[in-house]
Amino acid sequence: MIEILLVEDNPGDALLVKESFSGRYVARVTVATDGEEALGVLFQPDYRPDLILLDLSVPKLNGHQLLKRIRRKIAATVPIVILSASGNPDDIASTYANGANAYVEKPTDPDQLLRAIQAVGRLWIEPLCRPFA
C-alpha cells in the first residue's frame, strides 16, 4: 500500500486529493491540517510515507518551516511535492533550495485542481505501483 502524507488545511482540497488517489491507487492518505500535526505524524515510530504533499500556507508551522524540518530528519528519498496557491518565484525557489522535489501551483478551479493532482499521481505514485522488470 502506498502511504501519502497530505499537509493541507483546506478541507475541500484535502477531500479532493483523497478521492483522487483512493479511486486510482491502493493508497492511504493521512491528512495533517497544520505543520505541528504533520511533524507529530511524521515522527511516529514505524511511519514512513512514500510521498509528502505539502501546502505552504498551513497554520502553526508554515510549509517553508516544515519543509526544512522534514529534510533535516527524513532522507531525501521521500519525495516532497509542494501544492500551493502561491506562484511567487521566491516561494518556488525557496522550496527547491530546501529540498522539495516538485512545485505545483494549485489552480482555483476544482476541475483543474483535480487534473493537477492526477498529474502528481502519474509522476510520483504510479512508478511505485508498478512491479520492477
Image (cartoon, rainbow, N blue to C red):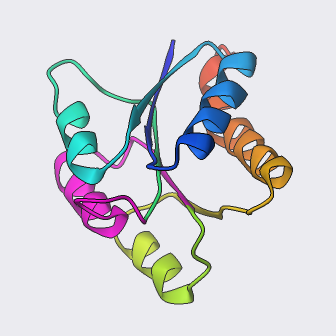
Direction from residue 63 to residue 102 in the image, left or right: right
Q: Quick check: 86 above or below 56? A: below
Instruction: Out of 76 and 107, give the one closest to the viewer.
Output: 107
The residue located at (69%, 36%) in the rendering is 121
Q: Which residue is outermost to the front? A: 11
Direction from residue 15 to residue 70 in the image, left or right: left
The answer to whether residue 12 of the structure is visible from this angle is: yes
Q: Pinpoint residue 33: horizontal percent, then vertical percent.
A: 37, 44
The residue located at (14%, 21%) in the rendering is 45
Q: Is residue 74 magenta?
A: yes
Q: Pinpoint residue 105: horizontal percent, then vertical percent.
A: 65, 66
Q: Tell me how many marks there are.
A: 0
**Magenta span:** 57-83
Q: Quadrant of the C terminus?
A: top right
Q: Pinpoint residue 118: horizontal percent, then vertical percent.
A: 76, 39
Q: Is residue 73 magenta?
A: yes
The residue located at (20%, 48%) in the rendering is 36
Q: Quick check: 80 above or below 87? A: above
Direction from residue 111 to residue 3 in the image, left or right: left
Q: Pinpoint residue 37: horizontal percent, then vertical percent.
A: 24, 41
The answer to whether residue 74 of the structure is visible from this angle is: no
The residue located at (71%, 30%) in the rendering is 20
Image quarter of residue 63? bottom left
